[in-house]
Amino acid sequence: MAHSRESVWDYPRPPRVEQSSRQVRVVLNDTVVAESSRSMRVLETSHPPIYYIPPEDVQMEFLSPSGNTSYCEFKGRATYYDLRVSDRTAMDAAWSYHNPARGYESLKDHLAFYPGRVDACYVGGERVQAQEGDFYGGWITSDIEGPFKGGPGTRGW
């Protein structure tokens, strides 16, 4: 199915959450650790989409809480997870909102993965490019246009 191009500058702030039926997949160490066609997509001005996967579609046995957290002014407190498959560990590779702020309840317990901390992420069969920087975790596909926040000199955007 063809998708029209989206500019991240047309995305809203505060961010919008929408359901996505596009197949998403996360791979580490030749193992599919998450795969879903029931994810939630978060769209925020200047950011590529972030896909939040329902826990039922994640191989939870590969995840363990890392002890790290962060705070989003819109979504609330995030809890981070290390992802371990056999002898490979990706530190803080995923995060989740266990008690999201009002308006973001649909994200509760869904997991988002940093594409730059795993071997590969896919949307609709297309391999994702990771958003620059080490904080935001957006998934860049050929139907998403920037420029994107996250790289050097973009912190004040």
Image: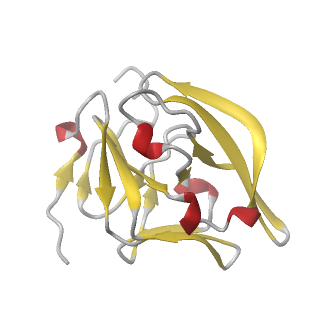
Q: Quadrant of the N terminus?
A: bottom left
The picture places residue 137, in percent across and down from the top left corner, at 50, 46
Q: Nearer the viewer, residue 114 or 102?
A: 102
Instruction: Name the quadrant containing residue 10.
Output: top left
Left or right of 39 on screen, residue 100? right
Residue 55 in view, yes or no: yes
- Residue at image location 35% in from the left, 31% down from the top: 103
Q: Is residue 127 above or below residue 83?
A: below
Q: How is the image coloured?
A: secondary structure
The picture places residue 129, in percent across and down from the top left corner, at 44, 60
Instruction: Name the quadrant containing residue 19.
Output: bottom left
The picture places residue 42, in percent across and down from the top left corner, at 36, 45
Q: Nearer the viewer, residue 83 or 38?
A: 38
Q: Nearer the viewer, residue 148 or 35?
A: 35
Q: How many marks?
A: 0
Left or right of 70 on screen, residue 13? left
The picture places residue 47, in percent across and down from the top left corner, at 35, 40
- Residue at image location 55% in from the left, 37% down from the top: 135
- Residue at image location 27% in from the left, 34% down from the top: 45
Left or right of 42 on screen, residue 9? left
Check the image and name the residue furthest to the right.
Answer: 87
Q: Is residue 110 above or below residue 3?
A: above
Q: Quadrant of the C terminus?
A: top left
- Residue at image location 41% in from the left, 26% down from the top: 74
Residue 25 in view, yes or no: no
